[in-house]
Amino acid sequence: MIGDVSRETQGLLDAYQEILIRWNTKINLVSPSSIPQLKSRHIDDCLQISAYAKPDKGIWADLGSGGGLPGIVLSIIFASRPIRFILLESDQRKATFLRSAIRDLGLSNAEVRNSRIEAVEPLNAAYLSARALAPLPRLMPYLDRHLARNGQAWLMKGEKWQAEVDEARQHWKFRIEPIASRTQTGAAILKISEVSDA
């Protein structure tokens, strides 16, 4: 879907998928009904970001990482780049899963912080991502807190993304580049930058 990945990278993505399926019987990381379509509905969905984002260095903050979508997927794809992934997850059980998966996959570029997003010191992240976390108006204070001045946020949003953008613009200024999702009709990846109070 996003072009060829190396055999090693594909092996890690396959291993991550197996780990996620195994843990999902104990912790609800993704909807059990979506497990048969795990690759297409979740992993391939997250891989879309790597077709557009071109990170070169710095911190990548993944907000509300949950099952590692997209944080772990992106840390696998960008493992050869000098990017440090910080996965923020307030649920202790999910944070335990993330740490276990990172250890099992040997991802030296990723770490987990078991904390609420608003309680973490500003990360000055060059890149930021979030998927199925909250409506855009609720995400904007997190972007304002954790995104570097010249940073880029990559937010995965559903069919109502335009309404969320319109509401967020009532209180915030930002530059936005919507990218149509290849895995869900009407959904979009929003590249957001230049965030400030309206």
Image: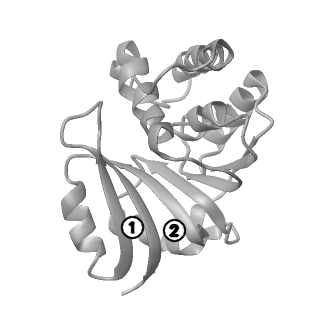
Give above or below for 34 relative to 62.
Answer: above
Which residue lies under the disc numbered 2? 142
Image location of residue 8, percent across then percent down: 68, 15
Pick whichever, 132 or 183, lies toward us: 183
Residue at image location 36% in from the left, 26% down from the top: 41
The quarter of the rendered structure image containing the N terminus is top left
- Badge 1 marks a residue whose secondary structure is helix
Task: Identify the residue at image location x=65%, y=30%.
Answer: 76
Residue 170 is tagged as none
The amino acid marked with disc number 2 is Tyr
Is residue 13 left or right of 193 when viewed as pictured?
right
Question: CA–CA distance between discs 2 and 1?
Answer: 8 Å
The total number of labels drawn is 2
Residue 65: name its quadrant: top right
Number of residues whose C-alpha sits closer than 10 Å to that of mark 2, classed few (under 14), some (14–19) or many (20 or more): some
| Residue name at image x 19 percent, y 63 percent | 163
Q: Is residue 162 above or below residue 170?
A: above
**Colour logic:** one colour
- Disc 2 is placed on an element classified as helix
User: Are the residues tagged 2 and 1 within 8 Å (C-beta)?
Assistant: yes
Q: Local crowd at mark 1 within 10 Å, few (<14), some, or many (≥20)? A: few
Q: Residue 59, image x and y in percent?
A: 69, 56
- The residue located at (54%, 28%) in the rendering is 27
Q: Which mark is residue 138?
A: 1
Residue 44: x and y in percent read: 42, 26
